[in-house]
């Protein structure tokens, strides 16, 4: 019998996606499915932990819409 897993659709740049895939490759706790080069389905109950992990490896703190739809602004230029 199939099991349903609640997920959040994340749209991000390929560079951010590769960071998320790298984080997930160690434990496979975050990604339900890689959909294409800019979309991932992430486990809903793990999204807060994933945000914290991305902040740990990022130069700038992640803007926590994680570009769900809109791309993040540069913290230096504002564009």
Image: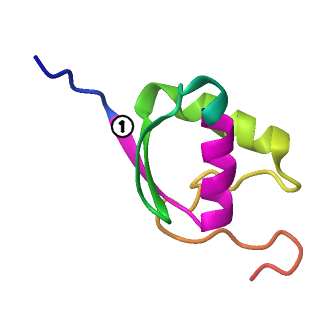
* Image position of 56 with respect to 38: above or below: above
What residue sits 60% from the left and 45% below the top?
21
Q: Report the front residue among 28 and 12.
A: 28
Q: Is residue 63 inside the magenta stretch? A: no
Q: Position of residue 24 (x, y in %)?
A: 60, 35
**Colouring scheme, one of rainbow, by chain, secondary structure, one colour:** rainbow
In which quadrant of the rendered view does residue 65 lie? bottom right
Residue nearest the observer in this picture, 13 or 52: 13
For this rendering, which residue is in front, 73 or 18? 18
The N terminus is located in which quarter? top left
Q: Is residue 52 left or right of residue 59?
A: left
Residue 37 in the image: above or below residue 79: above
Residue span colored magenta? 7-24
Outermost top residue:
1
The residue indicated by pointer 1 is 7
Residue shown at 62%/34% (left/top)? 25
Q: Is residue 71 left or right of residue 75?
A: left
Residue placed furthest toward the front: 25
- Horizontal and vertical percent for residue 35? 38, 56
Residue 11 in the image: above or below residue 52: below
């Amino acid at each position: 019998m199939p099991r349903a897993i609640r997920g959040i659709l994340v749209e991000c740049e390929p560079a951010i996606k590769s960071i998320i895939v790298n984080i997930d490759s160690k434990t496979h706790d975050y990604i339900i499915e890689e959909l294409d080069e800019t979309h991932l389905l992430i486990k809903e109950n793990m999204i807060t932990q994933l945000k914290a992990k991305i902040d740990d490896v990022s130069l700038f703190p992640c803007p926590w819409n994680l570009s769900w739809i809109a791309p993040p602004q540069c913290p230096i230029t504002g564009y």
